[in-house]
Image (cartoon, rainbow, N blue to C red):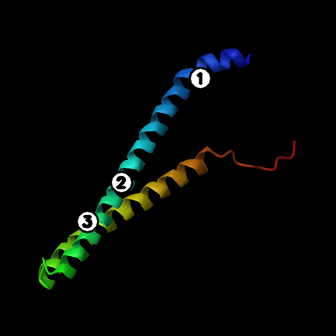
Amino acid sequence: MLLVDNILLAPFNGLIWVFKEVHKAAQQEIDGEAEHVAHALSELYMQLETGELTEEQFAAQEKVLLDRLDEIWEREEGAADATEATEQMDEPEDHDRDD
């Protein structure tokens, strides 16, 4: 009977695998974006120290980058919350039954 179950569930298992791979790729892209913003911030600080930027220019560009970094973190938190909720729904509930 297990063979029949595996055959019947194969399309669903394949679809779940595809969704997991898409999620993993999206997560890697988000992580890369956060690293890019952090790198841009460190370059910005170096430009300030070398005198390439004024304090006003630095403050304006820093605000943009920090806002973008906050957005990335909020998306990550939202995705983590959604993943946690999905995992909780997948877990079987343990009910004590008196049969």
Q: Could you say whether the residue bearing mark 2 is in a helix, strand or loop?
A: helix
Q: Are marks 1 and 2 in contact (CB under 8 Å)?
A: no
- Asked where in the image residue 53 lies, by quadrant, the reply is bottom left
Secondary element at image label 1: helix
Residue that numbered label 2 is attached to: 32
- Residue type at mark 1 is Leu
Q: Secondary structure at mark 3?
A: helix
Looking at the image, the residue that sits furthest to the front is 50
Q: Is residue 6 above or below residue 55?
A: above
| Identity, as a three-letter code, of the amino acid under mark 2 | Gly
Percent from the top left, x then y, of residue 57? 12, 78
Give x and y (percent) for residue 28.
41, 48
- The CA span between labels 1 and 2 is 35 Å
Residue bearing the label numbered 3? 40
Q: Earlier in the sequence, mark 3 or mark 2?
A: 2
Which residue lies most toward the right here? 99
Name the residue at 51% across, 26% down. 14
Name the image quarter holding residue 76: bottom left
Q: Quadrant for the N terminus, please.
A: top right
Sequence-wise first label, 3 or 1: 1
Chain-order first, disc 1 or disc 2:
1
Give the class, few, some or many, for how many residues have Cα within 10 Å of label 3's Cα (few <14, many ≥20): some
Q: Is residue 67 above or below residue 35?
A: below
Amino acid type at image mark 3: Ala
Q: Which residue is mark 1?
A: 9
Q: Which of 55/84 is in front?
A: 55
Quadrant for the C terminus in the image: top right
Query: Tags 3 and 1 in contact by the CB under 8 Å rule?
Result: no
In the drawing, does residue 39 fall left or right of residue 98? Answer: left
Residue 29 percent coordinates (x, y): 36, 49
How packed mark 1 is, by other alpha carbons closer than 10 Å (few <14, some 14-19, many 20 or more), is few
Q: Which image quadrant is residue 49 in?
A: bottom left
